[in-house]
């Protein structure tokens, strides 16, 4: 492993695919700026250290039992709550060891996923500055930050009768677009959101996988409401060529050879990320909507995508695949960035996770939006109504609606206009990343900011603390 003298960052990703990838991309970006990188990670969903020979990895026990892992597979709030409680001790033990290891470079600061809100108290006790990475967009974060107000004014918890009501405090959102998550423990959800927002506010700075031209007005509001340093330096994945190394599942490369045989911009790529689940009825409507659209399609059916019961494709009627005559290709996990960059792909049917949304914009692939929960709902609203680079399924997951939406996007004039707008957004992303572009400048400010924090850290750690926070 390459050794660099002087500046070390300790990085702590949340162990979910949509969080691990951007954190490791960020680590790569900062490594290229001269920092050495130490990753602390949980055993659960551990990244593969052999893919990152330049980084040092330290695994901590997360304390999750088999039954907790099983229960949290269908309740993400439970997982976040458990991780924030169970990682406190192993994480602080690990950090104390790293701080007191005189054979290693001194640590400049901690960069923690913002959802690991417990890290604020640990870092404070150890007098280590803490910057957070928020892996979602700025607009959805502002919606989370407004939760106390939204609860006070009766928007939350969401009432079915109010779904179409505009949220005047957060235009253009309607009640149905608010970033809620179904959980058995709604109070735990509010606790996690409060932890995310409050401990972000108490950080020494926030890094965003976003860019000025995409979320300018949200960034203006954020700077007013969060008087801490803000660094929008995205899109991260465009700093280097696509890499599969942070993928927790094996990416099926047959998708690329299948795409090679399809006409330009003809294929619908359908994938709903690493967490979202569908019921069997929705799954079948999607299958028939894709089949009836007469367009070729590449569909990611992650094992576990269909909730309760089926392993993989069992709910499909027998003979379904044969009737397609090769027009559909179904896989368990795709090399998504390569797929979106392939000339045959003409549309992305997505759940609008933030990474998927950015990846689609950066490859100028218009979207069909089917948000499932949390920030996906806000992202989807921005895609369809603000940036106007995609279409929502307006009357739910029904095969006729799916066919109609695919036609609007792939065949009709409306689709052409959408393609023009997404090309402009992609161009803006490219400009942000060029020398002198807003994201590059923000990255330079981040490096300067970390250098200033360093002097604070090095002074307070001239005699490393060996106490563990409680
Ligand atoms: N992804 C992938 N292959 C797939 C589906 C998704 O590599 O078949 C990647 C995708 O490129 C993205 C991440 O998984 O970087 C999903 O993150 P996102 O924020 O879109 O959604 P989440 O999984 O967090 O809901």
Image (tube, grey):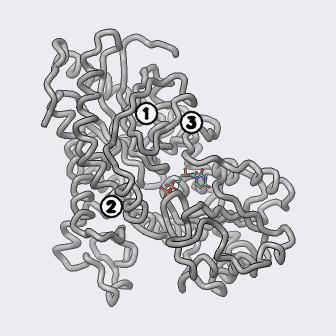
Q: Is residue 79 above or below residue 174?
A: above
Residue 328 seen from this side: yes
From the top left corner, tell me how far across and down residue 132 is, in percent.
32, 41
Of 151 and 230, the residue lying toward us: 151
| Chain-order first, disc 3 or disc 1 | 3
Residue at image mark 1? 443
From the top left corner, tell me how far across and down residue 321 is, in percent.
78, 72
Q: CA distance from mark 2 to mark 1?
A: 32 Å
Q: CA distance from mark 3 to mark 1?
A: 11 Å
Of 67 and 422, the residue lying toward us: 67
From the top left corner, tell me how far across and down residue 465 is, in percent.
16, 20
Q: Secondary structure at mark 1?
A: helix
User: On the picture, is 339 further left or further right than 90?
Assistant: right
Residue at image mark 3? 239
Residue 200 seen from this side: no
State which mark lies toward you, 3 or 1.
Answer: 3
Question: How many residues crowd mark 2 within 10 Å: few (<14), some (14–19), many (20+)?
Answer: many
User: On the picture, is 214 further left or further right than 6?
Assistant: right
Q: Secondary structure at mark 2?
A: helix
**Residue plotted at (47% across, 25% down):** 55
**Residue plotted at (22% across, 28% down):** 128
| Chain-order first, disc 3 or disc 2 | 2
| Chain-order first, disc 2 or disc 1 | 2
Q: Quadrant of residue 273?
A: bottom right
Q: CA distance from mark 3 to mark 2?
A: 32 Å
From the top left corner, tell me how far across and down residue 274 is, in percent.
52, 57
Query: Which quarter of the frame holds ligand 1?
Result: bottom right
Residues marked 3 and 1 touching at CB (< 8 Å): no
Residue at image mark 2? 77
Q: Quadrant of residue 233?
A: top left
Q: Is residue 390 above or below residue 66?
A: below
């Amino acid at each position: 492993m390459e050794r660099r003298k002087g500046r070390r960052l300790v990085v702590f990703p949340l162990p979910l695919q949509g969080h691990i990838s951007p954190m490791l991309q960020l680590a790569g970006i900062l490594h290229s700026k001269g920092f050495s990188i130490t990753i602390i990670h949980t055993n659960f969903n551990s990244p593969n250290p052999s893919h990152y020979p330049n980084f040092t990895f330290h695994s901590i026990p997360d304390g999750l039992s088999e039954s907790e892992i099983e229960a949290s597979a269908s309740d993400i709030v439970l997982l976040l709550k458990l991780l924030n409680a169970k990682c406190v001790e192993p994480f602080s033990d690990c950090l104390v060891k790293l701080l007191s290891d005189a054979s290693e470079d001194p640590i400049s600061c901690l960069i923690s996923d913002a959802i690991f809100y417990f890290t604020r108290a640990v870092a404070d006790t150890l007098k280590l500055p803490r910057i957070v990475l928020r892996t979602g967009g700025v607009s959805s974060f502002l919606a989370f930050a407004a939760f106390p107000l939204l609860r006070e004014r009766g928007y939350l918890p969401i009432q079915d009768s109010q779904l179409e009501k505009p949220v005047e405090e957060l235009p253009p959102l309607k009640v149905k677009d608010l970033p809620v998550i179904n959980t058995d423990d709604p109070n735990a959800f509010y606790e996690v959101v409060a932890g995310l927002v409050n401990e972000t506010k108490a950080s020494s700075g926030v890094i965003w996988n976003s860019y000025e031209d995409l979320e300018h007005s949200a960034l203006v509001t954020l700077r007013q409401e969060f008087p801490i340093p803000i660094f929008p330096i995205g899109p991260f994945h465009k700093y280097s060529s696509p890499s599969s190394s942070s993928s927790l599942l094996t990416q099926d490369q047959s998708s690329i050879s299948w795409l090679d045989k399809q006409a330009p911009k003809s294929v619908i790529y359908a994938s709903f990320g690493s967490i979202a689940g569908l019921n069997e009825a929705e799954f079948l409507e999607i299958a028939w909507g894709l089949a009836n659209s007469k367009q070729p399609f590449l569909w990611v059916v992650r094992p576990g995508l269909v909730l309760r019961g089926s392993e993989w494709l069992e709910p499909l009627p027998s003979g379904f695949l044969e009737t397609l005559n090769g027009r559909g290709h179904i896989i368990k996990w795709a090399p998504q960035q390569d797929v979106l960059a392939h000339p045959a792909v003409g549309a992305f049917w997505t759940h609008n996770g933030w990474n998927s949304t950015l990846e689609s914009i950066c490859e100028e692939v218009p979207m069909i939006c089917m948000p499932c929960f949390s920030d996906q709902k806000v992202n989807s609203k921005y895609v369809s109504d603000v940036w106007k680079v995609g279409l929502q399924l307006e009357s739910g997951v029904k095969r006729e609606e799916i066919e109609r939406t695919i036609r609007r996007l792939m065949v009709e004039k409306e689709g052409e206009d959408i393609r023009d707008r997404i090309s402009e957004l992609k161009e803006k992303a490219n400009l942000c990343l060029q020398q002198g572009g807003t994201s590059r400048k923000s990255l330079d400010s981040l490096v300067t900011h970390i250098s200033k924090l360093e002097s604070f850290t090095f002074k307070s750690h001239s005699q490393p603390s060996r106490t563990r926070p409680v």
